[in-house]
Amino acid sequence: DQEIAAGLQSCSLSPENSVISPLLPWENFSNWVHCICIVAFDLELGQAMEMTYPHQAKLTEKEKSSICYLAFPDSNSGCMGDTQFQFRIRQCPPSRPLPPGLVAYNGGAPAPLQADPAHFYGYVYFRQVKDPSVRRGYFQKSVVVLTRLPLLGLFSKALSLIAPEYFNCGDPSIEAACQSMDQWPPPVPGQTVVLPLNGVLLKARLPVDRATGSSPPQTSPSQFHLSAVAVPSVHEVDIFRCFLPILPHVQLLWELVIVTEPVVVMAQSPSVCSEMVQALVSMIWPLRYCADYRPFFTIHDSEFKEYTSTNQALPSVILGVTNPFFAKTFQHWPHIIRIGDEYPPNSPQRHKIKKASNLRTLDSKPGLYTQYKPLLQKDKMLLKKLLKGIQTKRPSEVQSALLKRYLLELTQSFMIPLERYMASLMPLQRNISPYKGTPSLGPFKPDDFLNTLENAGPQLTTGIKGDWAALYRKFFRCSNFSGWYNSRYKEACQKLQALHVEAISDADPLCWIQDKQEVEVVDLVLRLKDKLTSGERGNLPLTPHTMDKLRDHVRTIVSKLPEDLQQVLASS
């Protein structure tokens, strides 16, 4: 198996390799992980960070404090044994430059899986066991993988290998794990990567934004001593298991998520609430959820006052909480999901939607509390299919696939009219002149778009009736729309620039410059060189053929200039 052989070769710790691949500056490591933290409970200090590795990984005091509080379940959770969960925090300062490998990765990754320059994702493995040698009688410690990548499936699997090894062998195992990760290849969307870690090869496929991604290589059974462990999905949760307690309300939840309504998930443990928040955010795939979300949130969070204030408009955020204190603090929130002790339940809970104002006591029943009136009619066929699957004991993976397909088609049906309208704002290609400036995209006019819905709205592809226009109006006011529009606007501008450059490459440059002043000709040469540079750097989608023609144009135009100007332009 060539992949596994390559993985073995890359993780060899021979002296020769250590010279070729020095530990510093951790370039490969930083493409995947910012650092690994060890957080322990100190009787005098509370949660305290024992170690970060690599040691040169930079964290501010505010970030360290947030990580320490979020690395442990709330005291009321009673999580014994091993617990895995996730959190997400703002970086402080607000943004650090992404490593070059992650910049390249973002160029081809689906929007929801792109590396985040403004947030850290924390993947936690918490252990609490009885230990008479400790004054409190319990051993409590967490291993945290901190990264810019929202790859829940991959890092949860990696952490399940790193943390038990640490609890058995101590600090040297963290150093060994980081050295293994420093041998990982750069993340490339569309490729299947083989990642050595603790004597195991993790094999995972990174999703790609376009259908042009490479197909996963075929592998034969390994002949080597390292075992290859397939990661089924680098980013997905089992959404059927997550939504089972509130299955009848899935379509309503989709509406809340796509228009970024504020939602609180209350559960008994951080693993349950964080997984539910991840499931909610993933409901609108392949659209990126652009509002804030916190899979696990505590009263110690730096945004606690901001999110619990009753004196200002509620923020667009999805929060996962476990502390009963939040039942009172968040009782003014419009949408609350309460998960019961039995999770996941054996069948969907038959709870009706309750008004959010009913959540007054700490022992409120599980269910969905909301004042929201759905704008779309409920699709009863989906629930019938899933209930039948429960009765026939259909595997959870199949149920999840059905639910994912339904949500994907619903989101696509919602977005296709927007994509179609956006395409109509592009100038006609025949109107793009090489002798004029780059044309601009037409303005997005919500009313014009809404007028197209009757003949080309989502009801044509989904069959779901309802007030789609009202849903779009809500969508236009939320960050999911602005995030999508800004991305499409940038893509359209690049496309228009590329089409304009193609038009220039097809034109006769000598015809254009014959009645121009030298200063205008020099300006044209500099602009063409700038376009070539953008194409070479991948900032403009230009074909090699177009680039060659542009270079020929530059040489032709420059040859007609005086010799002194030719020398100046040659050095520019």
Image (cartoon, rainbow, N blue to C red):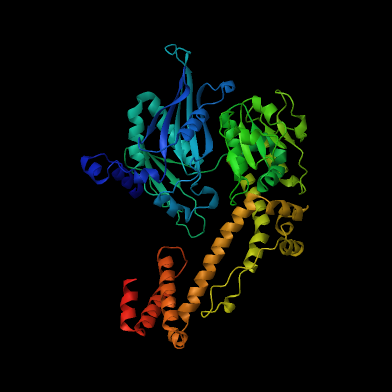
Image quadrant occupied by the C terminus: bottom left
Q: Quadrant of residue 247?
A: top right
Measuring from the top left, give residue 3's x and y in whole percent. 35, 48
* Left or right side of 194 for 500: right
Measuring from the top left, give residue 219's x and y in whole percent. 39, 48
Q: Residue at the spot x=59%, y=42% of the render?
A: 292
Look at the image and tell me whether residue 395 can be seen: no
Q: Is residue 32 above or below residue 347?
A: below
**Front-most of residues 465 and 542:** 542
**Front-most of residues 521 and 249:** 521
Q: Quadrant of residue 48?
A: top left
Q: Quadrant of residue 32?
A: top left
Q: Is residue 325 above or below residue 1?
A: above
Q: Residue at the spot x=73%, y=52% of the render?
A: 471
Measuring from the top left, give residue 286's x and y in whole percent. 58, 52
**Front-most of residues 447 and 273:** 447
Look at the image and tell me whether residue 209 can be seen: yes
Q: Residue at the spot x=52%, y=52% of the render?
A: 110
Q: For the image shown, how many numbered marks are present on the structure?
A: 0
**Front-most of residues 532 and 126:** 532
Q: Is residue 150 above or below residue 510?
A: above
Measuring from the top left, give residue 294's x and y in whole percent. 58, 37
